[in-house]
Amino acid sequence: MSERRFNPPKPEDVAIRTTGFPRRFEANRLSGEERLLSGNFEPFKGFNNERESNVYAFYLELTPESQEEIMERVVEPMRTVAQNNGIEAVYPNYGDIYPHVTFDAARFVNLDPSQKQELATNLDHNLYFNMIARILAGLDFSMDTLVIAPSSYICTGQFSSELYPLEKARRLIEKVYGKSGLETIDYRDIFHSSVARITGLPEDKSHLRDFKNEAEEKVVKKIKSSPISISVARAFRSLAIDFEQNSGGKIA
């Protein structure tokens, strides 16, 4: 466990976030579902080298136990559901990066390659980032929802006190990004882990709805009643392209 922790949240801070969080989550869920069912989306072809080279990100590496639970309870059932409906996809440890959380990310703005590398090196050694990483290591929370979309992910659908340290850390990270001249990528308060990226559509697009319905029955209901336990083994940061290339991600 970490030696340092953020101060406990005030009840009113949790109450404010509890009110707005479900609305933002529901907007994300509906948007992803609508894109999936329309069939009008570009299947995942790999991470874009140029775009990802311009992103710096904080990542949460999960404990082996948490990774195993995600694989057994979400990824393996999702693979079966996709195969049942003629949908091609990549998954953590099956063509995609192992289960993890991309915690917070930002884009470099108007920098040449040498300037970008210099700034990335400075962020790698930033003392505030070092402190935040130490606090994040050892945190526990849960994920109780699967968002079924062209790129499906698990997340938490309700804000609770266990998420407060994560949100606090995210706000501090974004302050450092801003002071460093980076443009924060808005994750809309969702703490998520990718579990499936569609790479090929079925001949009959009606199977996309069958895929959604079957995933709801076999995965969504189960993790809603018994959430996935998430424990952070460590927090680290790097250029997105470096993490993706070194972790088995597919580069377009």
Image (cartoon, rainbow, N blue to C red):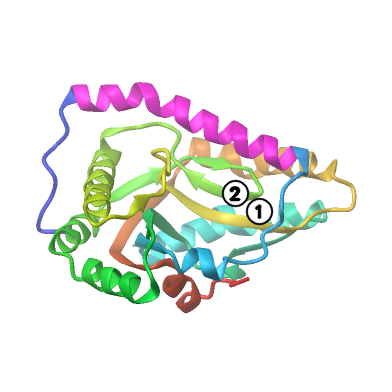
Quadrant of the rendering where the N terminus is positioned: bottom left
Horizontally, is 20 left or right of 241 in the view? left
Q: Position of residue 140 (x, y in %)?
A: 29, 50
Image-quadrant location for residue 39? top right
Mark 1 and mark 2 in contact? Answer it, CB < 8 Å: yes
The residue sitting at 24% across, 66% down in the picture is 123
Horizontally, is 214 left or right of 202 in the view? left
- The vertical placement of 249 against 185, above or below, is below
Q: Is residue 136 magenta?
A: no
Q: Position of residue 203 (x, y in %)?
A: 89, 53
What residue is shown with label 2?
152
The residue sitting at 59% across, 72% down in the picture is 251
Residues shaded magenta: 12-37
What residue is shown with label 1?
78
Q: Is residue 239 visible?
A: yes
Q: Is residue 15 magenta?
A: yes
Q: Position of residue 87 (x, y in %)?
A: 78, 56
* Image depth: mark 1 or mark 2 in front: 2
